[in-house]
Amino acid sequence: MYGISKRWCGGLICLASILSRAAAQNDGIIREITTTTAGGWLQDGVMFDVEVSAGGDSSQVVDSTDMPDGITVMGMNILTPKEETVCVEIYSKSGSHEGFETDSAAWTFLGSVSVMGQGRDSLTPIPVRSFDFGDDTFVPAGEKRSFYVTTQDQSMRYTAYPDGPHTTGSLFISQTVPVGITSVERSVASELNVNIYTGVANDYAFGATWKDRMFNGNLLYTLGRDTSNVPIDQTANYASRGKTTCDNTVAPTASPTISNAPSGAPTTKDSTLKAVATILVGGFLQSGNMFDVSVPSVEEGGPEGGVTVLAMEMSTTSTDDICVEVYSKEGTHVGSEDNASDWTMLGAATTTGQGAAEPTRVPLGSLDPVHIAAGERRAFYVVMPEPLMRYTQPIMGEVTGDVFTSNDDIQIHVGSVNAFDFGGYQSDRIWNGAIIYYLGVQAVISQRTLDQGLAQFLVQKIVRQMLTLVLILTRMLVLVLIRMLVLPPMLMLILPQMLMLILVLQ
């Protein structure tokens, strides 16, 4: 599960969002909770459970008249690959969907609505009030309610977790809603937790099911049962409701759509996501690394529009959920290793560590895009609270500032290894990871484009790792042979340098 934040981890491990405190009961505010937009698979529909639980300071006593008694689901956004009219049907039932996946009699039909699909990488809105809501969409505190969102032609994107970590019935994401009550006499605080659980994918309608699947999109909800002060989305006036399936079409909402990609110019068929990796041999552990990324000048053959860094991969020994923070600054990191005021935080993300054998991705969309113009240099600080980030000491005497790896667009330089929160550091260290970028200014990049870009350099990364291993083994062999006086000293210097040149050119 990816959790995205724009604040530091320190003890709060990447809160998914910072929610403003709201008055008790219904305040007319539409809130949203997003599952994921990772996609990967298509099916007719998806079932999942929603739960509301109480939280906060148990020492504070809050009157039942002060606290919202649950939430009312008012609308949702889905993910569909279509950019044409899509018919969506919505059902609900009290309690979990488990055991009722094929039992249509157990479900209440809330309505259907035709919406204009916004494509695979932008959420398609199902406007507030466009389906029946009330008791059949109310989730009481302490209870679950399940939802079944379906099309008729495999137009729903979802994410599959056949190998974990998410299984049907397990908590996928939780959102805490602070509820503050303030008066002359008192000021107390409590919380409601809105939880969404991993569900199943379904054939239309109430057909065959596949477990360990997650709905892609978000739910729009309001606190409490009273929805009289919730504004009506005018596009919902055209929604087909009741027992008629999609008689009318809802035009795209004028509200901004939500995407898991950075905002910017639209993606075109010429858009190409690229990446350049260092190595993945590890050897040592620390909390973070600082390093410079430079773009050659146009005269040197660099891209005229520069590059925009969108995401990263790093290496960790952890296979648990980890929090990764990324900072950046103009120019080199040298001289700013322990000066936090020189740096700007790009974002933080909670992601699942892939262990030493595989790179761990800092997800697309979790960092503010950073543009590096041709001929310029920018420093990055990738760090996590625990000293579980892998790095490598110099292989052939590299020092801070040396170009360790490059392609035609960018160069990654040898940097330093750093303790958490701009702590102690050691220079001349090699970051294990990859920079994922786009040529030119920032652009909307889809998950499909991300996967294609990563696939393009996967073979290069494997070759690079093999050559690195060969380099290390060759150097060891040469040292042994020279001690045996089998090879002249000059060959000990020439052979590793030749292999290093091949490594850098790949």
Image (cartoon, helix red, strand yellow):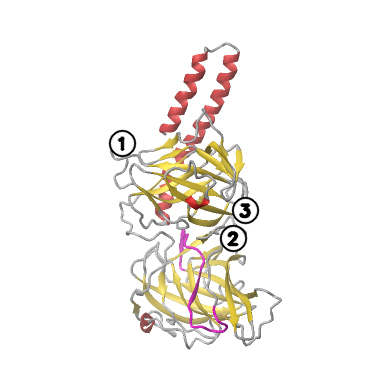
Quadrant of res 237: bottom left
Q: Does the magenta run of residues contain 262?
A: no
SS type, badge 2 = loop
Query: Quarter holding the N terminus?
Result: bottom right
| Mark 1 residue type | Glu
Q: Does the magenta run of residues contain 39?
A: yes
**Which residue position is annotated with label 3?**
320
Looking at the image, residue 57 lies above or below residue 279: below
**Which residue position is annotated with label 2?**
166
Q: What are the residue bounds of the magenta stretch?
A: 22-44
Judged from this view, the residue extending furthest toward the right is 59
Residue 438 image point, x, y percent: 37, 49
Q: Looking at this view, is 267 or 479 the one in front?
A: 479
Visible residue check, residue 146: yes
SS type, badge 1 = loop
Of badges 3 and 2, nearer the viewer stands 3
Residue 402 image point, x, y percent: 45, 34
Looking at the image, residue 203 lies above or below residue 25: above
Residue 205 image point, x, y percent: 48, 73
